[in-house]
Image (tube, helix red, strand yellow):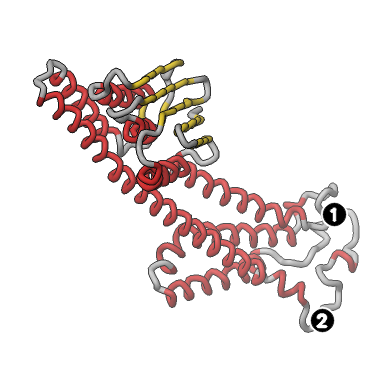
Amino acid sequence: MATFFKNRILLTNLVIGVALLSIPVLTSPDFGSNVSLLKINPFKRNLTGYLLLLSFFYANYYYFIPKFYNQKKMWLYGVVTLFCLVIIANLPSLIFDGNPSSQDYPGRPILPDDMPNGVKQPPFDLFDFRDTFIFQFLMVLALSLLLRLDNQLKHIKSEKLRSEVSYLKAQINPHFLFNTLNSIYALTLTKSDKAPKALLKLSDMMRYVVTESDTQTVPLEKEIAYITDYIDLQKLRMGDEVDFIYEVNGNPEGKQIAPIILINYVENAFKYGVNPDESSQIHILIAIDDKGVMLDVKNKITVEKSVLVDSTEEGAKNAGKRLEYRYHGKHSLNVNQSSETYHVKLYIQLV
């Protein structure tokens, strides 16, 4: 995300640079003629002015605004800006004469139309004001300020969302631990031989949470292994009354996914789909194709409907935020709830 953000800023600034440098070329009256533009003083003057404007744009965007404007050194920022304006408004005219000469157009006399505003100049002319680059300078100043402030707001928003996602992870992870510890505790009470294997799976799960949950992406096979360990631990407390199916189809090799982003839907199926006092049903399918991964979870509702709504609302909201943050425009989520079943179908495009 950060790399994309930086690349977008760089591309925008490059486009602005090309646009500024194209103005003196496209607006030259000799553009497209047989006359070499670089031999004409008025063109060289305009090109120099726009090169200075472009230099000011980059200096203002990358240095003056962060160094002075953002640091509340407004008087210093004003002095620097005024100094740049004086240089840009006067230096091109000092280097190049703005009026065409016979050297600019060899082989023909200078006509009145060749003069910038005719032979006779009025006391004040709007085009004279334009040729001082003051108007262009103000436009470049405003553009660089707006772009910089807009990018700063987007960066702040992105960091805020990143912090919020980290907080959501912190909310989710302890729940895995509590559920798993309850299952292992039940095994130890019965002195089951399955307890050591369960502890090993718990160790693998916690290692995954601690080492991988703060990374941007993990191999898809690791995420699936984490889900499989979780399911294996939950199966330890399930009886024969549960109609349970778990399948993984496809090859996850070479694909990356945001960590701990699928488990919420699997976890909910066990929380609200297993009841020792009645028949239960949980079907979980993970299917991997060339582009991404699909998670299909369907369970029979075995708790009170009011409890289901209240308990799952926050978890669904958190999971939805993470999906929107990490896979905006690259995922589809369908949740269907009837009086008897809860069905979630999620597809995430990974490639």
Horizontal side, residue 105 vs residue 300: left or right? right
- Residue under the image location 28 percent in, 26 percent down: 230
Q: What is the x, y in percent for residue 225? A: 32, 22
Judging depth in this view, the residue of 339 and 250 nearest the camera is 339
Is 257 placed above or below 290 here?
Answer: below
- Residue under the image location 26 percent in, 35 percent down: 176
Horizontal side, residue 174 vs residue 11: left or right? left
Q: What is the x, y in percent for residue 290? A: 52, 20
Is 244 placed above or below 333 here?
Answer: above
- Answer few, some or many: residues within 10 Å of disc 2's Cα (few below 14, many 20 plus, some between 14 and 19): few
Q: Quadrant of residue 215?
A: top left
Query: Which disc number belongs to residue 122?
Result: 2
Q: What is the x, y in percent for residue 44? A: 70, 58
Q: Residue furthest bottom?
A: 123
Can you identify the residue that label 1 sits on?
A: 106
Disc nearest the viewer among 2 and 1: 2
